[in-house]
């Protein structure tokens, strides 16, 4: 074997190595191009999905705008009382301020079926006092605590003159969490 | 055509030529070999360049997909929040609808009594399961046959719709029971008038 034969073998080896290298690089390019294609398809389908989701959100925003506006207006009124004690104290203080003749006064915390208002402060109140004074007091409570609910009201004649005996059950909501106007 | 012998080697062993040399035109073969080798290197470089370009494109597409996915998650989260808010609003509405003020109705009923009638008992109670619905029961002493009509009119003017009425009478003593449902949209209560003391 002379130098020329050796050179020919080296050239052949180089060709083989070069060929293998080319094949490897081409395979890598094919793989990356396939991944690129998949990624492009994935990005495009995600973009289409995003458009759908955003349209759904917009639609939902439009549909629920009135309800959310309602919630904005009522959020504060619904969150007046955060503990049973606060509601009991507020009602008791207003009874005392009005100097109503109170025959009985009892408070309890009861369960409610409403998911967002799972508990109520239920006040059982019996007054015997002047007709106007008593009804004004009930009206003032309903006005001052607009989320309050008079569940039951019974009025009969009182013992004297213009007096009435009013027996009422007043429910005050205790929301699950403070209801605010904005999320 | 002259081709330098260093470039186009003759691979055969050094020996005395016994045959005439190959035609000169065949010296093009090594030139083609070099050209192909150069072209192959060029193609290899081009392929590497394409790989780089595709890698950049891949990263960009993956980043875009991730960003889009993040926006989808944000949109879904916003939608879930909105659904919760809407549900909360529906629950609050349900409560508010069942929390209409009863004092104006009680006052209106008292005022509806004519001079020949006296209200002896008035009961307003809400249905536990349907708090919008109010049961009105009243007992009165009345010599006026049209008193009930006045009372029903007072109920209507207070934005309540009466239905399922029951009435019984023994002499002057009249018992009247009716279910009421509030008709106005739920708005915060505003009681403009106070109950007059002379009622």
Image (cartoon, rainbow, N blue to C red):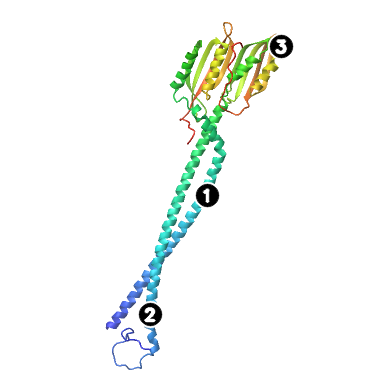
Label 1 vs label 2, nearer the camera = 1
Across and down, in percent, residue A156 comes to 59, 11
Disc 1 to disc 2, how far (Cα)?
A: 56 Å
Furthest-left residue in this view: A2
Disc 3 to disc 2, how far (Cα)?
A: 126 Å
Task: Output the chain of dot 2.
Answer: B
Q: Secondary structure at mark 1?
A: helix
Label placed on residue A51:
1
Furthest-right residue in this view: B145
**On the rendered structure, is B145 left or right of B34?**
right
Residue A163 sits in which quadrant? Answer: top right
Task: Identify residue for label 2.
Answer: B33
Across and down, in percent, residue B98 comes to 57, 25
**On the rendered structure, is A2 left or right of A156?**
left
Task: Output the chain of dot 3.
Answer: B
Label placed on residue A77:
none
Task: Identify residue for label 3.
Answer: B144
Mark 3: few/some/many CA within 10 Å (<14, 14-19, 20+): few
Q: Secondary structure at mark 2?
A: helix
Can residue B88 be seen by looking at this rendering? Answer: yes
Task: Output the chain of dot 1.
Answer: A
């Amino acid at each position: 074997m002379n130098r020329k034969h050796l050179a020919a073998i080296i050239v052949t080896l180089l060709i083989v190595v070069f060929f293998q290298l080319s094949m490897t690089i081409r395979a890598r390019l094919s793989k990356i191009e396939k991944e690129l294609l998949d990624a492009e398809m994935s990005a495009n389908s995600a973009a289409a999905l995003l458009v759908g989701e955003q349209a759904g959100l917009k639609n939902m925003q439009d549909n629920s705008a009135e309800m959310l506006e309602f919630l904005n207006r009522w959020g504060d009124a619904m969150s007046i009382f955060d503990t049973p004690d606060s509601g009991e104290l507020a009602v008791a203080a207003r009874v005392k301020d009005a100097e109503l003749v109170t025959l009985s006064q009892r408070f309890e915390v009861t369960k409610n079926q409403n998911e967002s208002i799972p508990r109520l402060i239920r006040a059982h109140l019996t007054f015997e006092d002047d007709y106007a004074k008593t009804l004004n007091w009930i009206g003032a409570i309903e006005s001052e605590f607009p989320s309050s609910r008079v569940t039951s009201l019974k009025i009969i004649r009182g013992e004297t003159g213009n007096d009435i005996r009013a027996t009422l059950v007043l429910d005050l909501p205790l929301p699950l969490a403070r209801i605010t106007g904005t999320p | 055509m002259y081709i330098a012998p260093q470039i186009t080697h003759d691979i055969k062993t050094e020996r005395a030529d016994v045959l005439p040399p190959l035609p000169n035109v065949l010296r093009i073969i090594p030139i083609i070999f070099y050209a192909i080798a150069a072209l192959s290197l060029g193609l290899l470089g081009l392929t590497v360049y394409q790989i780089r370009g595709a890698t950049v494109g891949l990263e960009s597409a993956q980043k875009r997909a991730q960003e889009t996915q993040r926006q989808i998650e944000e949109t879904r989260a916003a939608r879930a929040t909105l659904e919760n808010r809407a549900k909360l609003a529906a629950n609050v509405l349900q409560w508010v609808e069942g929390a209409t003020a009863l004092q104006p109705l009680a006052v209106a009923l008292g005022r509806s009594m004519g001079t020949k009638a006296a209200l002896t008992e008035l009961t307003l109670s809400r249905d536990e399961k349907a708090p919008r619905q109010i049961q009105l029961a009243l007992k009165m002493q009345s010599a006026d046959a049209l008193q009930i009509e006045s009372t029903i009119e007072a109920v209507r003017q207070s934005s309540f719709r009466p239905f399922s009425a029951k009435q019984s009478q023994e002499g002057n003593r009249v018992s009247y029971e009716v279910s009421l449902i509030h008709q106005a949209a739920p708005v915060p209560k505003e009681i403009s008038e106070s109950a007059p003391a002379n009622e």
